[in-house]
């Protein structure tokens, strides 16, 4: 919460965020350029130039468009921020946009010899004085409101009604001023002696407007700290130069000083508009980045759903196939005369084993994709490999694959999820069988080997005699959805690597691209607490051991 009287912290990156030292230097540089142009034009301000009746309508049309656009954008900021300071500034820009219109309509010879809407000789001059008083006065109010706390600055009334009444109020005010200045033209103190010549009163009214502009400029330089304040500083500096030129240096209409005044007016009206356009561009870029990020996140979530779905289909396809084949075999054996009950019993046993395997697959996948820590237990790798090879005897025989299994003796236990480790070995063996399916010029040999390494790790190797993996594919073979099979999902090896890495190990592949491939994963040996030391570490029973 802000202390009383403290300015509320603006949102980072917005127009109300604190200006950086670099942005302040740019502001001082812009004010310096305006001051330099003022000094360059001042000595020649009374030099008479050709009259151009179309100059005022053209220049003030630009000012009208820029001020009206700025007012609309500032009212939009009021809608978002509910800030009284922004409301004052937006109303001021709307007022200047409207008064520019009536000033142009009353200007002599812009549209008529004496202007239109019943204007007199003094109407245009007094509209100019009021115009250039209202803007810096509104800036002063804006700065003072900015110094209030955020709670006191917020508009509590409904924003639509506040904005509507502000717009109606500005229109009514301009219409009232126009009516008064046209109706009381002959009673107004004279600013013009004739259509081209200023009266001495211009000095006093112009000096007053210049003083108000100077106060607004000093307040912005001393107390204005936001990005918007820097742009307002440039705008007020241009207005100050405009009034100083017309008050102290210009001798009348259509001299160099008079023309330069309109150029300063264009600069004053466009400065804040540039700030708002810059802010809108920044917000649009930020929104575009956010939308693209959300789209990528959505695509990633869809990809994850696809990956999990494909993983489940990939992992349970083999046990379901085994169940179907063994069910057909059991029916065939039972349909014989006499029925072959022994063979049917074996087939039903295989169905039971495949069913248990399917459950283990689903449990392993659920654990694999869950964020919770996985429950592990002491696992005998040789026993897992033996069970996998036994369950895949049907596939090995169908593909005429010879198996050479070389288990290391007295292999220590590893801390692992038995079902997930079983899936790794199953996938590697199944991939080896499929890789050798097209091979006809040599024996199909599956080599599975375990070994104990001196760095207290167990290495498991699965080697085939297929056609191998191309060198360009070997680096990406473990990436999701990358496959060398015609109908592969590209998920088996990716899941294998994920499982091995979650167990603290590494999975790698080597191949010469001609005579088969070797897949090898290395797992660290589990550390267990037991009463029998190394002997139980090698051959312990899970219920007697605690994983550490």
Image: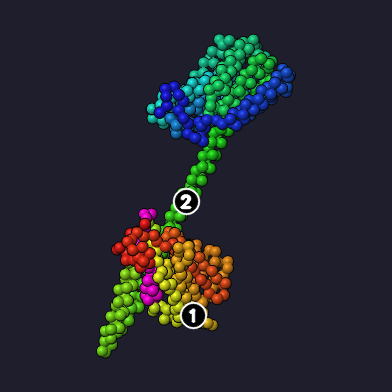
Q: Find numbered disc 1 in the image and state the secondary structure of the residue it sits on.
A: loop
Q: Which residue is mark 2?
A: 295
Q: Earlier in the sequence, mark 2 or mark 1?
A: 2
The Cα atoms of the two marked residues, 2 and 1, are separated by: 47 Å
The answer to whether residue 211 is left or right of residue 431 is right
Task: Assess whether residue 388 is covered by the magenta stretch.
Answer: yes
Picture coordinates of residue 8 (x, y %)?
Answer: 45, 28
| Residue 519 position (above or below residue 288) | below
Residue 451: x %, y % from top left:
46, 70
Determine if residue 230 is in view. yes
For the point 40% across and 28% down, the residue is 1
Picture residue at 43% right of the left edge, 30% below the top? 82
Residue 101 visible from this viewpoint: no
Q: Secondary structure at mark 2?
A: helix
187 or 494, which lies in front?
A: 494
Q: Residues within 10 Å of mark 2 (few under 14, many from 20)?
A: few
Q: CB atoms at circles 2 and 1 under 8 Å apart? A: no
The residue carrying mark 1 is 444
Query: Which span of residues is magenta-colored?
Result: 371-392
Q: Position of residue 429 (x, y in %)?
A: 44, 72
User: How has the structure been colored for display?
Assistant: rainbow
Comparing 287 with 163, the one in front is 287
10 Å crowding of disc 1: few (<14), some (14-19), many (20+)? many
Q: Is residue 361 above or below residue 294?
A: below
Residue at figure coordinates x 33%, y 75% from the top left: 323
Q: Is residue 290 magenta?
A: no
Q: Which mark is residue 528?
A: none
Residue in the image at 51% along x and 32% along y = 17
Task: Indicate whether 16 appears above or below 248.
Answer: below
Name the image quarter holding residue 229. top right
């Amino acid at each position: 919460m802000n202390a009383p009287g403290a300015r509320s912290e603006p949102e980072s990156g917005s127009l109300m965020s604190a200006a950086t030292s670099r942005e302040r230097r740019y502001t001082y540089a812009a004010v310096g350029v305006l001051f330099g142009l003022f000094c360059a034009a001042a000595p020649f301000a009374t030099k008479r130039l050709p009259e151009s009746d179309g100059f005022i309508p053209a220049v003030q049309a630009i000012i009208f468009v820029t001020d009206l656009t700025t007012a609309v954008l500032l009212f939009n900021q009021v809608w978002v921020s509910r800030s009284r300071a922004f409301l004052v500034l937006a109303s001021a820009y709307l007022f200047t946009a409207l008064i520019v219109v009536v000033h142009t309509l009353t200007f002599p010879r812009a549209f008529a010899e004496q202007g239109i809407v019943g204007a007199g000789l003094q109407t245009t001059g007094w509209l100019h004085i009021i115009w250039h008083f209202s803007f810096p006065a509104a800036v002063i109010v804006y700065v003072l409101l900015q110094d209030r706390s955020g709670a006191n600055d917020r508009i509590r009334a409904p924003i639509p009604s506040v904005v509507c009444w502000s717009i109606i109020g500005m229109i009514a005010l301009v219409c009232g001023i126009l009516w008064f200045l046209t109706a009381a033209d002959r009673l107004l103190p004279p600013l013009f002696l004739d259509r081209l010549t200023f009266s001495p009163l211009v000095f006093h009214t112009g000096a007053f407007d210049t003083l108000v502009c100077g106060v607004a400029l000093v307040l912005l330089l001393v107390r204005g700290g936001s990005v918007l304040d820097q742009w307002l500083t440039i705008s007020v500096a241009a207005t100050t130069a405009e009034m100083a030129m017309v008050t102290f240096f210009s001798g009348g209409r259509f001299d160099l000083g008079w023309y330069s005044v309109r150029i300063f007016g264009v600069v004053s009206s466009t400065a804040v508009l540039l700030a708002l356009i810059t802010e809108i561009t920044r917000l649009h870029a930020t929104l575009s980045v956010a939308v693209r990020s959300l789209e990528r996140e959505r695509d990633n979530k869809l990809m994850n759903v696809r990956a999990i779905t494909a993983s489940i289909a990939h992992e349970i396809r083999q046990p379901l196939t085994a169940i179907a084949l063994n069910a057909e075999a059991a029916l065939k054996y039972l349909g014989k005369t006499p029925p072959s009950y022994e063979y049917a019993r074996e087939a039903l046993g295989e169905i039971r084993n495949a069913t248990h395997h399917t459950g283990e697959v689903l449990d392993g996948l659920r654990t694999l994709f869950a964020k919770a820590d996985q429950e592990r237990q002491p696992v005998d790798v040789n026993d897992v490999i033996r069970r996998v090879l036994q369950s895949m005897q049907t596939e090995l025989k169908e593909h005429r694959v010879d198996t050479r299994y070389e288990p290391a003796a007295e292999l220590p236990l590893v801390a692992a999820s038995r079902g997930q480790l079983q899936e790794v070995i199953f996938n590697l063996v199944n991939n080896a069988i499929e890789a050798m399916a097209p091979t006809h010029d040599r024996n199909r040999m599956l080599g599975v080997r375990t070994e104990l390494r001196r760095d207290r790790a167990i290495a498991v190797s699965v080697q085939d005699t297929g056609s191998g993996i191309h060198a360009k594919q070997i680096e990406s073979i473990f990436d999701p959805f990358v496959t060398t099979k015609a109908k592969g999902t590209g998920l088996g090896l990716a899941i294998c690597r994920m499982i091995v890495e979650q167990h603290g190990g590494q999975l790698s592949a080597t191949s010469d691209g001609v005579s088969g491939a070797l897949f090898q994963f290395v797992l660290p040996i589990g550390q267990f607490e037991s009463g029998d030391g190394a002997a139980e570490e090698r051959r312990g029973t899970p219920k007697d051991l605690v994983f550490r």
